[in-house]
Structure formats: C-alpha cells, structure tokens
Amino acid sequence: MNGIRDETPTDLLRSWKIVHIPDKPPVSPHLQETVSMLAASIEPKCANLVVRHAALPPVKLNQTAPLENLRHVKRIRRTSLDGGKTQLSVILCIASGDGESNNLPKDVLELVCKYAALTKEEWEEQCRLWPTSFHPPAYNIDGITGFSEEDSLLVYNFMKIAVALAKSGIGVVNAAVIVDPSTCQVIASARDQVQSRNVALNFTSEETSTAEQLEAATMDETTEIKNDQSFLVGCSADESKLPYHGVACLNPLGWLEPQLHSSSDSWHPLHHAAIVAIEKSAARDKHLFPLNVDFSSKDHKVSSLVGSPLKRLKTNTNVKDEVNMNEHIDGFHCDATRPYLCTGYDIYFVWEPCIMCAMAVVHQRIKRVFFAFPNPNEGALGSKHRLQGEKSLNHHYAVFRVLLPELILKDDTDAALTVSPLM
Amino acid sequence: MAVSSEETMPDNVMFMKLALQQAKLALDNLEVPVGCVIVEDQAVIASGRNRPTQTRNATSHAEMEAIDKLLEQWQKIGLTRGEIYLKFSQCTLYVTCEPCIMCAAALSIIGIKEVFYGCANDKFGGCGSILSLHTCSSGKRTSDGGSKRKEFKCTGGILALEAINLLRSFYEQGNPNGIVPLSRKPTSLAKEPFH
C-alpha cells in the first residue's frame, strides 16, 4: 500500500542508514585547530612511581596550572617505546610567547587540539597528537552512539510511515509523525496544511488516529477531500519549476502561490506539518487527560513508567496493526503515563524542518528528530541553521538524518498521480 | 491620529500598554505573561496572549494567536492570499517580549511590516538575541526559484521594565507546569548563579 514497495529488513539495513547530525558542524580531522603546550617527559625508570601516583600530578597541576577551556585534553600521555618500555609525559602549561619557546628544547613542545572532538573520527585523529577525552555530544540520548539493528528497523518503519503520509495526498508535501518510542505508538501525524486542509487519501493511520484523538471535536478535515482538486491544479503547474514545490518548509512563501480554484477552503501560511502535528498531539492529550495536572512532581511520574508493562511493546511493520495496537494501549492510559507535552517523544519528518518548525519542536520538548531529506535553503537542523547547537535554549533534542533512496518519493508521485490501467 | 492634548504619550507606548494588558490576562490565567496587539492604520485589529498551559500546546504563543485571529477574520470576508499578504505588510506588532525564534520566523512568513517589543528574550529570542530572523533572510529568490521569507523592522525596549516585572512575578509565584532544568554540569553551575 501507499506506493512503497515492501522491502525485507535485510534490504533496509543494507540500503538505509541513520546519521547523527551533531550540535556543531564537524571539523575535518586534519583541519582541527591546535594549541602549543609545554610537556615534561618522565624517565622510563620513574614510570612505575608515576603510574602508581598517577592521580597526584594532574590534581596538583590542575590547581596550580589549570588548563582552562582545554578540559578535553588529557594531562598525561603514555607512549610505548622500543623494547616494551613506557614513557609518560605530563602537560605543564600552555606555551606562551615565541621567545620563550625558542629557548626551550624542542621535545618539551607538544601540540594539542583546541576543541573537544564531536565525532569518533575527530577524536581518533586528535589522539595522534595528544590524547583527549571524547564525550559524545549532548546528554544520553539513545542513538547518538549508534543504533542497534532492531532500533534501526523501528526508525526506518516510522520514517516509512512519514514518507507514505507525505505522498498520500495529491502532490508531495512534508509530513510529520510524532512517536512515543517507549511504546512504539504514533501519537499524532500530519501533512502540510498550508495550501488546503487536504486529508491523506487512503491512509489508514492518519484517519484512524484523527478519529481517535478528536472524536469529540468534529473534524472538518474529512469533508475536504474535494479541495484537493484545487491543490492538484496549483501544484502540478508549479512542479515543473521546482521539485517538491508544495513542501512548506522548503518554500515558506509558497502559501502565496496563486490557487486556481481558491474556493472557501481554509488554508494557513503557518500550518506546516510539524505545527499541525503538535496541535493534534495537544488535542489528543486534552482528550485523553481532560484534567489539568500539576507537573511539579513530573519526574517521579516519568520514572514510575520504567518497568511498566506499557514500556517497549513490540510491533510489526504493518501500519494497520500498529493503529489497532495503539487503540488497545489507549484503553490503559492513566495520568501516571501522561508526559509533559511531548517529553521523550520522537518526530519524523520527510524534509528537514524550517526554523519555525524546528523551534516549535523545541517548545514541545521532543527528544529526537529524524528527517530524510535536507532542506538547503531553509533547513534549521544543519543546512542553514543548526538549532540543536544553540546552547541558550531551554531544551535540546538530538537530530538524525535517515539516508534513504530518493526514488522513494518518485515512486509515490507516480503512484499517486498516474493511475493508469495500462501500467 | 489626533494626539490628545492631555497626554502626549507616543503611540508606541500606548500600544505596548495594550499588549501589557494582554500579558496581565495571561498571568491571571497562570500562563507565562506575554501579550501582543496587531495594529493597522493606528487601530488595534487583533490581540493575543500566551496559552500553552491551557492548550497544552507549547507553540500557543501570543503572536501565533493574534495571527490566527486575523487569518480567520480575513478569510471569512473572502480576502485572497495576495490581499492578505498586502494587509499583513501594513501591520505592526507590539509584543511585550521579543518574539521567539519560531514566532520571528512566522512573522516573516506572513510578511509583517514592523515589530516593537518590550524586553529581550535571552533564551530564545529570534529578533537579535539568539538568531536574527528579521534581517537574515530577505525576500530574495533562491537559485532554484523558491522564495524565502521576508525581512521586517524590529525595535526593542518599549516599556521593557513593565514586561520584565510581569515575567518576574510569574516566576516568583512559581510556574505550575515548569520543568526543573536538567542537572547541569558542575562547572557551569559554579559560574552561573540561579536566576
């Protein structure tokens, strides 16, 4: 269904890949900045003594000659000499003026890397000069140090749902899928609704989750399929100019494009997929937990989840089964399982979000962001801005790109637009 | 445009006072007190206030609410996209706190003419504090024909103290939904006193 061919897990693991997008653009290892340091070699004879008291010199040195802003640099280097002997060197201080260093023997001068490594590759390169420590950037978010095959397949599965959603209407747009990774549950999903409130056609997950979230509120979306006709006309005319012109985050002023059938349909220049998905997740939250709860003791609630039977329910890759399972889980929702906003949740985008959407996702406290295709002009997670690296923000998420064949979009356009009985 | 002889209060200050009223309303509703008004031809045509607690949607910022109201209103009377864009390009926003990165981007997408704000937003301000979304992407066409967002004029510091005092009284009474910040590294803790 949805025009995506069924691939075996082995196919997926071979042809798809998850890449972490760090807080700062990675520096190519040989271009890393260095600082000159003065280091004292320790006689191999004394090695034993120094090793035994290894904690001592650094502690003292860090007090008398602290290495401000070089905390990643290890104070002691251990080198294996010919004949199995070991030599230790200790950094004394940053080498000051040139005059002074000229008077010093060459072997006390050492170069160390100025900035902490962001990737394992950078770190390995740094250690050739002088050992440094490597802490994978940002907290302990699952995936930064790599994904297991099982977790990769879960990620690919949700990305497939996002891609299918992006292709499910007429014209490819961006899609956002909010997922609770602890239960593998789709919390909310949406397509761009900038041009019109076009519903996903033939997309079970979208329709079911909408019905389930907002059964009280009458959703006008289901009545708006007819408006997609106007979307089709507007879109196909533009698509010759710019591929994926309808993707709101790629083209934020796209809402101004003339619509040939601008009927009374409701359009909204800011209803990018992420904004709508967040709105839906908020509506779902209100529906499931009608009472406002004081979140001051939220940390306890979250920790009480660990070990609960809701944690980590396995699901297969079928969208329909997933939705059924979600309904099943929903029956068990109680306040103890209610997260603060989208804390702990993942969001999947087909295209890297623009800065508005990326910040909306910060506000809503999403934990991990996955996107498939970069957004060179407006992308806020590495292309134009790098919001995950803005230290001042009160919340930070980890960002991953899922590398997948772009053909997946072509397939869909063909499947959605050309329903030729001959083919 | 008649200036009252009694009070020669600049328009800026007058409109910001109306925005502050919205912020107080937010405070009364246990929301982070930020409010705004949108002005066209010296008349307030929309107002908005922060509502994330009420909506459970952390993107329900004052600016977004005011924009939503205008869009709905203008679509109802049948204005076209072009007409709406033109109208926004004649509107000025007064907001008690510097628009966040999300709102600043939104304001440039709809093409607002000008923004006046009260206090700066050191954590996520999008009009100069953290990013400068009001200037850095002018309405130029990109190489592949896509169009970028629009620039707008932005001035801060209008009744900033009033805005800060409102925020302060909110944080003093305690944010019922606030999160305790994640434990920071001891090094930064030592340098940075709690606010």
Image (cartoon, grey):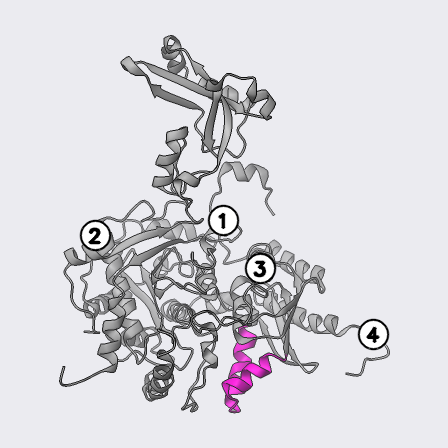
Q: Chain of mark 2?
A: A
Disc 3 with disc 1 on a shared chain: yes
Which residue bears the numbered disc 3? B125
Whichever of labels 1 and 4 marks the residue nearer the N terminus, that label is 4
Question: Mark 3: which secondary structure?
Answer: loop
Q: Residue B152, how many percent across, how many down?
A: 61, 70
| Distance from the alpha carbon under mark 2 to that under mark 3 | 39 Å
Furthest-right residue in this view: B5
Question: Which numbered dot is residue A265?
Answer: none
Kindly identify the amino acid type of the residue bearing the numbered disc 1: Pro
User: Which is closer to the viewer, label 1 or label 4?
Assistant: 4
Are dots 1 and 4 in contact, CB under 8 Å?
A: no
Disc 1 with disc 4 on a shared chain: yes
- Of residues A100 and B72, the one drawn nearer to the viewer in this rendering: A100
Q: Residue B49, how many percent across, how many down?
A: 58, 70
Q: Residue A231, how many percent across, how many down?
A: 36, 84
Which residue bears the numbered disc 4? B8
Whichever of labels 4 and 3 marks the residue nearer the N terminus, that label is 4
| Distance from the alpha carbon under mark 1 to that under mark 4 | 45 Å
